[in-house]
Image: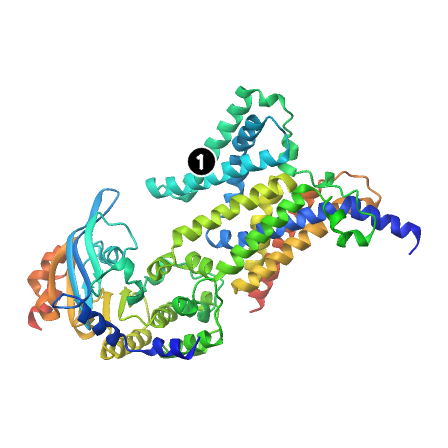
Amino acid sequence: MSQASLHQLHASPVEAMQGEARGGDRQILNALNVRGLTVSYDRKPVLWDVAMSVPAGARMAIIGPNGAGKSTLLKAALGLIPRLSGECTLFGAPVAKARDKVAYVPQRASVDWDFPASVLDVTLMGLQRQIGWLRWPGASHRAAARGFLDQVGMADFADRPIGQLSGGQQQRVFLARALAQQAPLLVLDEPFAGIDAATEHAIIDVLHRLSQDGRTILAVHHDLGTASQYFDRALLLSGTVIAEGAMDQVLTPAKLQAAYGGRLAASQLEAFAAS
Amino acid sequence: MTPQDTLSLQEFLQIDFPSILLAALAGVTCALLGNFLILRRQALIGDAISHVVLPGIVVGFLLTGSTDSLPMFLGALAAAVIAVLAIEGINRLSGVGREAAMGVVFTAMFAAGVLLLEQSGAGAVHLDVEHALLGNLESALWLEADGAASLLDPQALAALPDAAGRLAVVLGIVGLFVGLLWKELRMVSFDPGFANNLGVPAWALGFGLSVMTAIAAVAAFEAVGSILVIAMFICPAATARLLTDRLSVQIWISVAVALLAAVAGYLLAAFGLASFGLNADLSAAGMVALTAGLAQAAAMIVKRRRLGSA
């Protein structure tokens, strides 16, 4: 990697974003903008006319019961699964033309971890753009990948086969791979599912640092108890959008009741009413 | 060198060398692709392709009226590529899954081939089932060879069986495909969603892999038969997978296992039992496939011992 491209790698994503904002004609620059999104599996609608705005710099959670279509919303918004209708833009540009602006952390369980690759190999996947097609990673790419592993506390595991990792370690490697993409928007699908407390704290630390750096974070989140602690905005989803906005305006007992129905215990609703 | 030794080297080059060369070329070509096929749970695509080539061979014969290997080869290749397209298309449109799509396509096309063979009168042409299954390794000859110098003599090399030349070209193409796209193939095999988001098209690379597999399978069938092709797509790569957790190392081990199976399997078939004074006519392709299977069994034992002692 040349000195110049190394510099680009570390250039603040916010600067890149602002450059674009001046050229664009939108008043508010959204990192991700979704309008009229409808998705169905086998003619069964999963998402119906969903609109979502993720303001640049926000830490936003997508919250909702099982089967609400949270992961589907992420994948459809990023164009990874077909949609029946809807328009999605990343920083004002069509998603297909702005792939370099979003890093995606899929669900940990979506891949087979019994795969012949080391922790470093997987992290290097995030540097695909820097390395380029048909090229093999060089020493500078390896060094950069080790740096991203260090940010998630996995530097000592770089040469470990991924089949030997715990769930929490797998999640950290996925995060390191996404960090390597250096994208202004980070999209995470259930990053806290089935991991240890130490990993949860490590991930939260990284997300806070990214947020202070001006990056936008969008995550599917399950735990209503920690949602307002980790995120500042929320979209409450149950096939359709129940509510969207600042966390305290979304997590109200009435709106949660509308999203979860009887699935949320009365005591949990009272706790929210009291807080 | 005594005249006796020279004669036996010449004999080896004329009779045994071309067979070993064909088995090795076919084995390495299939093993390279097999590494990605087993990781993508598509190992049996070789089996499917061995069935779908039948209608292609029959149509190739009907169109040209010739039993030369080239029209048959092109017909088989066209059928294999059509099958790969049909499998992907059915999988995407109906969502029944790749395995079911494979089952539908290969049985339907094989049946169509049988009907075509019966109806067209092409059935009168000798169609040797044993040949198709076990190949014709032993019949490969290199009569122009008269010593070690022939290995460097272009004129003598040109007299090697046609299949060897075709396989060498296909090995070159497959080697380039895997060598250049190794990183991308690994990414789409491990995490297609992540790859798609990066702009590395998982579908296109998977399709490219299937087309390469079809080309390799068809080129190898005519030389070594379908049993050996199916074995070489699976056994070397599966053996290597048991012995390492690094894909680059796995690919090299699979190539070594394929070469070992080709050489050891052929020598066992040609000389193994004879050296015990038994006069048995063993199929070389069968023995090579069996050797590859034994290599995998040995790797499983090694792996279990390693796990046990850990």
Task: Locate the N terminus of chain A by quadrant.
Answer: bottom left
Image side of residue A255 versus residue B227, left or right:
left
Image side of residue B231 versus residue B111, left or right:
right
Task: Locate the C terminus of chain A by quadrant.
Answer: bottom left
- Which residue: 51% across, 31% down? B110
Mark count: 1
- Which residue: 52% across, 30% down? B55
Q: Amino acid at mark 1?
A: Val
Residue B34: x and y, percent?
54, 52
Residue B115: x and y, percent?
51, 23
**Is B124 placed above or below B252 here?**
above
Task: Looking at the picture, tell me which residue is in the foreground, B183 or A233.
Answer: B183
The residue singled out by tag 1 in the image is B105
Residue A177: x and y, percent?
37, 69
Image side of residue A114 versus residue B139, left or right:
left
Q: Is residue B231 among the parts visible in the rendering?
A: yes
Q: Is residue A59 among the parts visible in the rendering?
A: no
At numbered mark 1, what does the secondary structure look like: helix, strand or loop?
helix
Disc 1: CA contacts within 10 A as few (<14), some (14-19) or many (>=20): many
- Which residue: 32% across, 69% down? A195
Task: Looking at the picture, tell me which residue is in the foreground, B278 or A217.
Answer: A217
**Is B291 placed above or below B113 here?**
below
Task: Looking at the picture, tell me which residue is in the foreground, A68 or B176.
Answer: B176
Residue A44: x and y, percent?
22, 44
**Which chain does the numbered disc 1 sit on?**
B
